[in-house]
Amino acid sequence: MNMTIPFDNSFARLGNAFHSRQLPVRVAAPRLVAFNDDLAGVLGISPGDAAEQAQVFGGNHLPEGAEPLAQLYAGHQFGNYNPQLGDGRAVLLGETIGRDGQRRDIQLKGSGRTPYSRGGDGRAWLGPVLREYIVSEAMHALGIPTTRALAVVETGEDVLREVTLPGAVLTRVAASHLRVGTFQIFAARGDLTSLAQLTDYAIARHYPGANGPMGLLEKVRDAQAALIAGWMGVGFIHGVMNTDNCAISGETIDYGPCAFMDGYHPDTVFSSIDHMGRYAYANQPNIAVWNLAQLATALIQLADDRDAAVEQASEIVHAMPALIEAQWLARFRAKLGLTTARAGGQAGDRALIEDLLVRMAAGQADFTNTFRALGDERARDQFADPSAFDGWASEWAARCVGEPDVPATLRAANPAFIPRNHQIEQMIEAAVGGGVGGNMGGDYAPFHRLNTVLAQPFADQPDHSDLKRPPSADEAVQATYCGT
Ligand code: AMP
Ligand code: MG
């Protein structure tokens, strides 16, 4: 083996209360589909060759220094507390401290059963694995905190869902996999020793200098507020913002039934299981606050003076909506090309943004293409009734007077390319190809093309302008699935 990974496994050292040692389960015929050389470089991995990568990131060969384990956590799923979840289909291989000095987890997802599988098979099929690779790397290129994707390996095994599908393993890289649910499980069990140990660990790893549990709560709040504003600014809908899918680091994590909107509407929901619209686009700020309140509830238990801690935690949580709002405003002002503060306060800018969004919703305007086209004549073409845009544009033009460089601000804030759902579906179809039934050899050209184009989402890339096109009526994806 020529591949080396400089592991330093702080979570494994934390002790048995937090995880179960678990080897990845061997797969029949691992074959490398994708490897992220740039990310490997950042992690300090000397990559070896494709055959080795398939062995390591398929789970058949354990690299030196790995200490694989499944992490324990709980979580509120759609508002209901589930007292035990955990990595049911993933193992943490270990951590590296990268060339940039950052500690990151390297995790295999789809690596077989663990003590936390709860009746599941521990596997993933190729579709959601490719989806997470594309969407997480696109999110990174868009400048929004996210877990990343290091490798995809076909397992050469069938996975049985409603039909038989080709199996795959995703190698995911994260600042950590600590979730709100990681704290909840120890709080719910009354295991305050472990909860305190976890809190100290999280502070040391993510927010050194944070002052105790309430200091941590504040830092998580700020990171989550920035994250949600980032999602709103690119039309992203996570789809399953359960507390077990809410990372302490502030990274986007667990890409399941997620999607970017095409036509703008605040109530947009894709997830097939989200019947009430709990995780609809415009409800994400509310849910982020709800999730933070669950973290607060857990952390309060560590206080000697509970009453004082409740008061302090409430203050921290109650400040979150205004923080999200401020970040949202900054993002959307930039999306209108504005950098200067408005004379007389921000209320006018908020109204200007909301007026555009209301017109976009009514006019079925494409979210990404409308903002990208601001400042040229194509913007009005995005609206079913272009005069609806004209009515807004005159006010916007007046607001732009005195702004230093509106076109440059617009281009830097508004991507030309996002991973559109119908393109992802078409990419998966090509990759699976005749492969349903575990028969390999699909067409990965669309996967590699999407990956290349989405690495530079703010560049025009005229050769790929077909990827800017919203779906036609028969291409539109109506529902997305958790993909387990
Ligand atoms: P997720 O929807 O990916 O956030 O997963 C929710 C929970 O279900 C986590 O504890 C997962 O580990 C578990 N899970 C999801 N899919 C599977 C699977 N195929 N086998 C075992 N556990 C799974
Ligand atoms: Mg999850």
Image: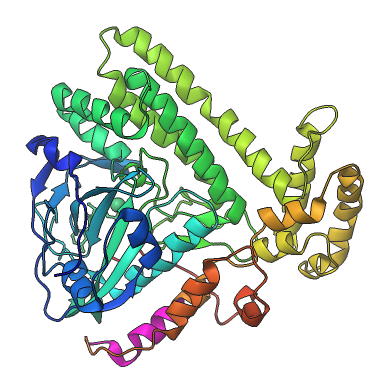
In which quadrant is the C terminus drawn? Answer: bottom left
Is residue 393 depicted above or below 296 in this figure? below
Q: Quarter of the picture for ligand 1?
A: bottom left
Q: Residue 168 is drawn in which quadrant?
A: bottom left
Q: Residue at x 74, y 39 (%)?
A: 350
Residue 271 x/y as whole percent: 43, 61
Vertical order, 125 against 212 (above or below):
below
Taking the magenta stretch, the answer to whether it contains residue 96 is no
Residue visible at 78% across and 44% down in the picture: 338
481 vs 71: above or below: below
Magenta segment range? 425-437
> Could you say where residue 245 lies in the image, as x and y percent from the top left?
34, 47
The image quadrant that residue 303 belongs to is: top left
Residue at left offset 21%, top offset 57%: 5
Residue 125, percent across and down? 27, 73
Foreground residue among 43 and 21: 43
